[in-house]
Amino acid sequence: MSRVYNFSAGPAMLPEAVLKQAQEELLDWHGAGSSIMEMSHRGKEFVSVAAEAEQDVRELLGVPNNYKVLFLQGGASTQFATIPMNLLRGKTTADYILTGAWGKKAISDAKKYCTVNLAASSESNKFGNIPAFDTWALHKDAAYVHYTPNETIGGVEFHWVPDTGDVPLVADYSSTILSRPIDVSRFALIYAGAQKNIGPAGVTLVIVRDDLIGDVLPMTPSVYDYAKQAEADSMLNTPPTYAIYMAGLVFKWVKAQGGLTAMATINERKAKKLYEAIDESSFYRNPVEKASRSWMNVPFILANPELDKEFLSGAKAAGLTTLEGHRSVGGMRASIYNAMPEEGVDALIEYMAEFEKCHA
Ligand SMILES: *Cc1c(COP(=O)(O)O)cnc(C)c1O
């Protein structure tokens, strides 16, 4: 069996070492005689797995003690609604920064709960940049400011953290969490669906400052109430036990690579060489302004879109899969999260050069 380099945007590649460990432990977890999947979430075995996963992600991200770390369900998309439910706290408006397709969905759900003030948007520029901070029209009485540090479809990333003063800052980190160190204390809430850089689909990481929770909209279901989930160690109902176990293995793998500083060095290098290969050719093009290019998702288009199909089938034959761009934008997209080995990026660059030579 040979594994391919899978450039999927999500669910994405997982580290091979993690998959092998899961395989070894699948039938008999640590001598317990059953799979972790088959164990009660209230039993001491699973409780220890969940506690260790929380401890490891706290350590990796340097989460301060006054923040809760929650493992929730429903994907990042559920957070689009649970954020206003929990964070409006008597206010009626929230500021949103729109830099791509996921931000648009977050806004659409938030509008069901509050007045959304579109404080900045790059939509008129086809989401090809990040609006400069001094152009943002922030409201001082907004309940919070929401933005998307990395837009997975457009491949547009903030390489800075906005300073919103006393207004709580909320970030959808789904596709760039754990790609580099971040200063969690700058944020009120960070959330991320797991299937890009954390583990398999099914669990969503939420990190929230504890003074902001407990004052929810009256119709909020209990499982969507951060304070109740924090009180219950994210086990108000049956949690996605296997996904949490897998996330825990990934956290240990990231630690073993040298933590987030080491991940940042590798990720920056991987992205840089791929963008260089694109920029140096007249055959491929990336539409995002240089200062806002994503380290995680690299979209590129072929000068002649009639060659798209052939590019993809040749790539697949070379063991490079899932390179087609999102259906809304077309072209190609290489997602190169933490688990994509540098050799995978090298192989892609080599294939692109070869393809160009044959078709330019
Ligand atoms: C993938 C993604 C989502 C949606 O995640 P689900 O788990 O499918 O709900 C939201 N935001 C960003 C930035 C994403 O990349």
Image (spheres, rainbow, N blue to C red):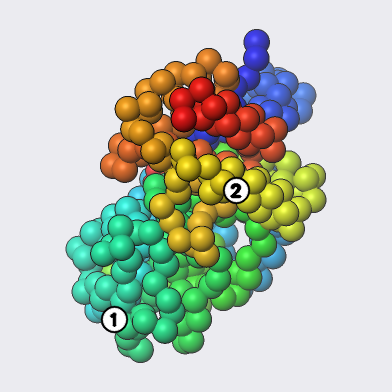
Task: Identify the residue at horizontal 44%, vertical 18% (top origin).
Answer: 313
Q: Which numbered disc flags the more N-terminal residue, 2 or 1?
A: 1
> Which of the 4 image quadrants contains residue 31?
top right
Left or right: 272 as drawn, with respect to 138: right
In the rendered view, tell whether residue 18 sits above or below residue 310. below
Task: Identify the residue at horizontal 32%, vertical 53% (top origin).
Answer: 101
Left or right: 327 as drawn, with respect to 1: left
The residue carrying mark 2 has its beta carbon less than 8 Å from ligand 1: no
Task: Specify the farthest residue to the bottom.
Answer: 140
The residue carrying mark 1 has its beta carbon less than 8 Å from ligand 1: no
Question: Regarding mark 2 in the picture, which secondary structure is present there?
Answer: helix
In the rendered view, tell whether residue 89 sits above or below residue 42. below
Task: Specify the farthest residue to the top.
Answer: 1
Q: Is residue 223 visible?
A: no
User: How far across and down, in percent of the image, does residue 155 sit?
Assistant: 45, 51
Q: CA distance from mark 2 to mark 1?
A: 46 Å
Bin the neighbour count of mark 1 within 10 Å (Cα to Cα): few under 14, some 14-19, many 20 and up.
Answer: some
> Which of the 4 image quadrants contains residue 327?
top left
Identify residue for label 2.
276
User: How far across and down, in percent of the image, does residue 144 sit?
Assistant: 38, 76
Q: Amino acid at mark 1?
A: Lys
The one of 97 and 317 positioned closer to us in this rendering: 317
Question: Regarding mark 1 in the picture, which secondary structure is present there?
Answer: loop
Identify residue for label 1.
91
Mark in front: 2 vs 1: 2
